[in-house]
């Protein structure tokens, strides 16, 4: 971003370009070799079998970490990868249904069940959309055909009937 001379009505020197403030945050993360995480992974993968589900490692971790990228998203990825997500989310959803006082508030809050389902849909849905829609969108972009059908937005020489066929 190029700074421009101050425009406060008075002539300013060409080298007086004002100031630019920059705020940086440094976070240091230590990532150990994957073998160090095996006991934790095994504990999380046993979560769907723990009764009550609220005593499972994944449920406790989800309750402790409110920021979902800290724990919920990695846990969902792990459970999906090992085909343990469905039993886990079924147990968590059953617990939420059991603890719900008002039927109108089921799954409306920022509960563990809603956060897990949301993350699962993003993980699975992103891949699905990329596989199914990307080729169609790429074809549309490469064709350079006009698809505008709003008469107000039509460019000179465009035809609504032809553009409808292009869509």
Image: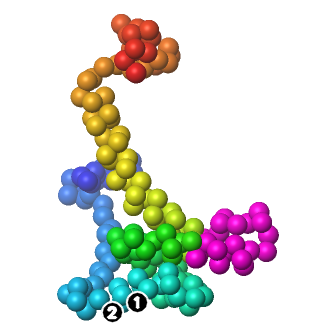
Any part of residue 85 in sight? yes
The x and y percentages for residue 24 are 31, 75
Q: Is residue 98 magenta?
A: yes
**Element type at mark 2:** helix
Mark 1, Cα crowd under 10 Å, few <14 / some 14-19 / many 20+, is: few
Instruction: Tell me if residue 135 comes above or below residue 147 in the rendering.
Output: below
Depth check: give the residue in front, 124 or 48.
48
> Which residue is at a point 50% across and 18% down the rendered structure image?
150
Q: In the shown orientation, is residue 66 left or right of residue 107?
A: left
Q: How many marks?
A: 2
Depth check: give the residue in front, 16 or 102.
102
Magenta span of residues: 91-110
Mark 2, Cα crowd under 10 Å, few <14 / some 14-19 / many 20+, is: few
Q: Which residue is identified by label 2?
A: 39
The x and y percentages for residue 5 are 28, 52
**Residue 159 — which label?**
none
Q: In the shown orientation, is residue 99 left or right of residue 156?
A: right
> Which residue is at a point 24% across and 52% down the rendered structure image?
2
Q: Are marks 1 and 2 in contact (CB under 8 Å)?
A: yes
Instruction: Tell me if residue 60 comes above or below residue 85 in the rendering.
Output: below
Q: Which residue is identified by label 1?
A: 43
Image quadrant holding the C terminus, namely: top left
Majority secondary structure in the magenta region: helix
Q: Is residue 156 magenta?
A: no
> Which residue is at a point 52% across and 65% down the rendered structure image?
117
């Amino acid at each position: 971003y190029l700074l421009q001379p101050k425009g406060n009505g008075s002539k300013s020197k060409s080298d007086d370009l004002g100031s630019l403030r920059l705020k940086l945050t440094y976070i240091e993360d230590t990532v150990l070799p994957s073998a160090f995480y095996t006991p934790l992974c095994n504990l999380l993968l046993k979560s769907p079998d723990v009764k009550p589900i609220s005593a499972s490692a994944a449920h406790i971790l989800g309750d402790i970490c409110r920021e979902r990228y800290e724990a919920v998203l990695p846990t969902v990825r792990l459970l999906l990868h090992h085909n343990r997500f469905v039993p886990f989310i079924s147990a968590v959803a059953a617990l939420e249904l059991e603890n719900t006082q008002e039927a109108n508030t089921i799954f409306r809050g920022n509960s563990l069940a809603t956060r897990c389902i949301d993350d699962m849909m993003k993980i699975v849905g992103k891949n699905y959309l990329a596989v199914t829609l990307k080729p169609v969108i790429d074809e549309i972009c490469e064709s350079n055909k006009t698809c505008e059908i709003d008469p107000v937005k039509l460019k000179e020489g465009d035809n609504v009937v032809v553009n409808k066929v292009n869509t």
